[in-house]
Amino acid sequence: MTVGIVGLGLMGGSFALSLQKYNISTTIYGYDHNITHQKQALELNLVNEIVSLEKLKTSDIIILAIPVDGIIKFLNNIGEVSLNTTIIDFGSTKELIIQNIPENLKSNFIPAHPMTGTEKFGPTAAIDNLYEDKTIVLCDLDVCNEQHKHKAIKLFEKINMNIVYMNSKEHDIHTSYISHLPHAISYALANTVMEHEDPKNIISLAAGGFRDMSRIAKSSPAMWTDIFRQNKDNILDGIDIFEKQMSDIKQMLEDENYEEISHWMSKANSLHDIL
């Protein structure tokens, strides 16, 4: 089986490593507009060959591991593909992407979201265990052809991913809380500290809590701007609810209601009973 990967950064590069580890693909094609990424992907043996769009279209499976706005643009520029070519996107939003699938690609297309990643990007960020034992969400599969659904499920099973099925609207609501809101909070925290602390104090005093919460603020601004744009309404709803929580703790502190603060914290502790 030949797999073409569009986007050779963390997600695409790590997926290439998984394909190699489990001997899934005889040939891995790479496609990326970034010349540096092309060279690095070849040097790191992530792909066998950097190919043109026309050769990419001969792949049995095409993986779109690019920013969400780029996915829509790519789908509208790829033109005709074989009825046997499965196209899988790895976008962090789903509803807008699905709404913009060209009619001729709807039966080929599998909307997927691997719930994994790091704050790093580029081919050098690729790691060989990024996908193992992680969840992948497959959305709105009633539209695609059965052969493509079967091929995608088998592919993700082979690399030991846990498959969850969801409609795209529900997916975007859930990820706004689980993924997108935490990124917004992390960026906000980083900017808050940068505006109010001397850099020397940040370096000398920043401990585990701040490092953990600010880590994802190192994520690609270009990628996350696209995500925020596509899932704007759900993220705004999440920010409203988060602001209510911050308003509550502010009021409790002003009132010196420390018993209520302890109860508030205990309620938050219960999240990890679920996780």
Image: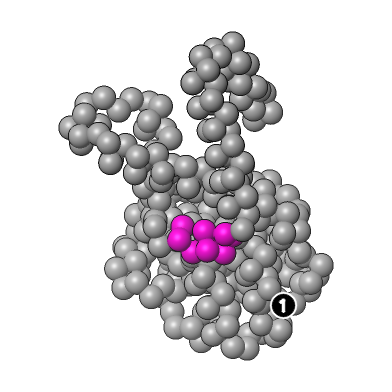
**Residue labelled with disc 1:** 106
Instruction: Indicate the quadrant containing the C terminus: top left, top right, bottom left or bottom right.
Output: top right
| Residue closest to the far left | 200
Coordinates of residue 216 in the picture (x, y in percent): 42, 44
Q: Nearer the viewer, residue 239 or 176?
A: 239
Q: Position of residue 203 (x, y in %)?
A: 23, 31
Q: Is residue 231 magenta?
A: yes
Alpha-carbon neighbours of circle 1 within 10 Å: few (<14), some, or many (≥20)? some
Q: Nearer the viewer, residue 77 or 150?
A: 77
- Image quadrant where residue 147 sits: bottom right
Residue drawn at x 49%, y 21% is: 254
Q: Position of residue 241 (x, y in %)?
A: 61, 41
Residue located at (74% from left, 77% from top):
107
| Residue 59 sits above or below residue 9 on the image | below
Assess whether residue 189 is covered by the magenta stretch.
no
Q: Amino acid at mark 1?
A: Lys
Q: Position of residue 149 (x, y in %)?
A: 75, 65
Outermost residue, front side = 255
Q: Is residue 177 visible?
A: yes
Residue 207 against residue 156 in the figure, above or below: above
Question: Would you say 141 lies left or right of 157 here?
Answer: right
Question: In terms of secondary structure, where does tag 1 sit?
Answer: loop
Lateral position of residue 84 relative to residue 122, left or right: right
In this image, 198 relative to 251: left or right? left
The residue located at (63%, 88%) in the rendering is: 80
> Colour scheme in the image?
one colour
The part of the chain drawn in magenta is: 224-232
Which residue is found at the position 53% from the left and 33% from the top?
246
Q: Is residue 32 above or below residue 251?
A: below
Q: Quadrant of residue 209?
A: top left
Magenta: predominant secondary structure element?
A: helix
Quadrant location of the N terminus in the rendered image: bottom right
